[in-house]
Image (cartoon, coloured by chain):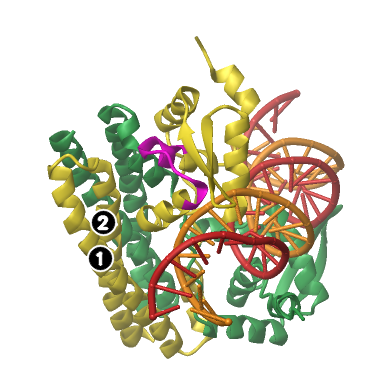
Chain colours: A green, B yellow, C orange, D red
Amino acid sequence: MNYRHTWSKIMTKGSKTQYAILGALSIQPMSGYEIKKMMEETTNHFWTESNGQLYPTLNKLEKNKLVTVDKQMVGAKLRKIYTISIMGKNFLKKWLLDDPEYYPARNEFMLKLFYGQNVPPNISINHIKKHGEKCQKALKIYIEIEKQLEEMVKQKKRPVYFLLTVKAGINIVRAEIDWCKESIELITKYH
Amino acid sequence: MNYRHTWSKIMTKGSKTQYAILGALSIQPMSGYEIKKMMEETTNHFWTESNGQLYPTLNKLEKNKLVTVDKQMVGAKLRKIYTISIMGKNFLKKWLLDDPEYYPARNEFMLKLFYGQNVPPNISINHIKKHGEKCQKALKIYIEIEKQLEEMVKQKKRPVYFLLTVKAGINIVRAEIDWCKESIELITKYH
DNA sequence: GTGGGCATGTAAGGTGTTACATGATTCT
DNA sequence: AGAATCATGTAACACCTTACATGCCCAC
C-alpha cells in the first residue's frame, strides 16, 4: 500500500558531484586532477569536490557513457583525460534547466554569534573582527579576478557567467564587511 | 580544573548539533519539539536540525550529564523538558570561545549559473529572477523581525546578538538583490 | 470524524570528508 | 637529497535527511 518508497527510489536525482564534473568537462577535456585544480581556482567559493567523491564519480560517469576517457601513460604513470559525450552534454543541460535547489546553508560563525550572550562581548567582537578580515582578503582576490575576467568577457574569451559568480562573491563579502562594522558598534552600545 | 580531557572522552568534537541544542537550552529549558520550533523561528536562515539528529543527540547529552531532563506525562503522552547543566554550560562556552570553522558552503544556484553557457541565456536569467524574488520575500520577513527585535533589544528583553544575525541576513539578501539586477543586464549585454 | 498540531523517536540510505596508499617527476 | 607537485584511487568513518511509526488532543 505504500508507493512512496518506490517513488523516491525512481526519482532520486542523486549527488550534484556528477553535474559539477560534467560542467567542468563542458569547458574542455581534463584529467581528474585538473578538474579538481580548476574547481579550486574558479568555483571554490561556492563549490568544491574531494578526491573521495571525484574519482569514483568519474568512473561512474564513464561506465554510464556520459564521458569518454583517453588513457595515456606518462612514464610508468597513468593519466586519464576525460571528454564529455553527447549524452553527457544532454544530461548536463537537463539539470541546468531545472530550478536549483536551495539548501539552508549552515553557518557556524552565525550560530556562535547568536548565542554570544553566554560569553563576554569581546569574544564575539573578536570573532566578528576576524570574519571581517577574512572578507577583506577575499574581496581583494575577487576584485583582482573581476578585473581580469571583465577584460576577457569583453573580448569574448570567457563567458559572462564566470564574471557573474565573481561579482556575487564581491557583493556578498562587501555586505558582510559593512555588517561587521555595524555589529561591533551595536554590541558595544547594547551590551 | 581542566575539563577538556574529560569532555573529549565524553563527546566527540565532531557534530555541531550538540552545540546548537545546548545553545537553545541556554535561553530556557525546552522539549525537543520546542527546540526545533525555536530553531525554525529564529536561526532558520543559518541553522536547523532534523529529527533524526535532534532526538538522538538530546539523549546523548543527557547520558553525558550536559543536560538534565524532567519527564512529564501529558495524559498518556511523554513530554521531556531539558535543562542545561553547569557542565553543559561550560561545554557550550568552551565551544563559543573557539574560532568558528568556515565551511565553503555549496550553492547549486551558483554552480548552474557558472555553467550557463551550455543553455540559452533566458534560462539563466529566469533562475536569477526567481532567486531575486526569493530574496525579496526573505527581506520583507527579516525587516519585520528586525523591527520587533530592535524594540526588544532597547528594552533589554532580548540580547543584541539575535538582532545581529537578522541584520546579517538583511545585508546579504540586499546585496544579492542588487547583484540579480546587475547580472541580468550583463547577460543581456554580453550574450 | 478528520485534519493539523503536539510529541518522541528509529531505520535506512545516501552524501561527503579524511587519511592513507602508491609512485613518478620536478624543483630547490 | 628532500620537498613539492603531479596523479589516481580506496577504506573507514562521520554526518545528515527522509520516511516512517506511534498516538494524543483540539478545533471545525
Q: Note whether A44 is above or below B133 in the view shown.
A: above
Image quadrant where one finds the C terminus of chain B: bottom left
Q: Dot 1: few (<14), some (14–19), or many (≥20) neighbours within 10 Å? A: many
> The magenta stretch spans which residues?
B22-33
For this view, does C22 lie left or right of residue A50? right
Is A22 in front, or is D28? D28
- Amino acid at circle 2: Ala
Q: Position of residue B109 (x, y in %)?
A: 47, 71
For this view, does A33 lie left or right of residue A169? right
The residue at the point 49 percent across, 82 percent down is B117
Mark 1, residue position: B174
Q: Position of residue A40 (x, y in %)?
A: 54, 55
- Amino acid at circle 1: Arg
Mark 2, residue position: A175
Q: Are marks 1 and 2 in contact (CB under 8 Å)?
A: yes
Q: Note whether B8 is above or below A64 in the view shown.
A: above
**Disc 2: host chain:** A
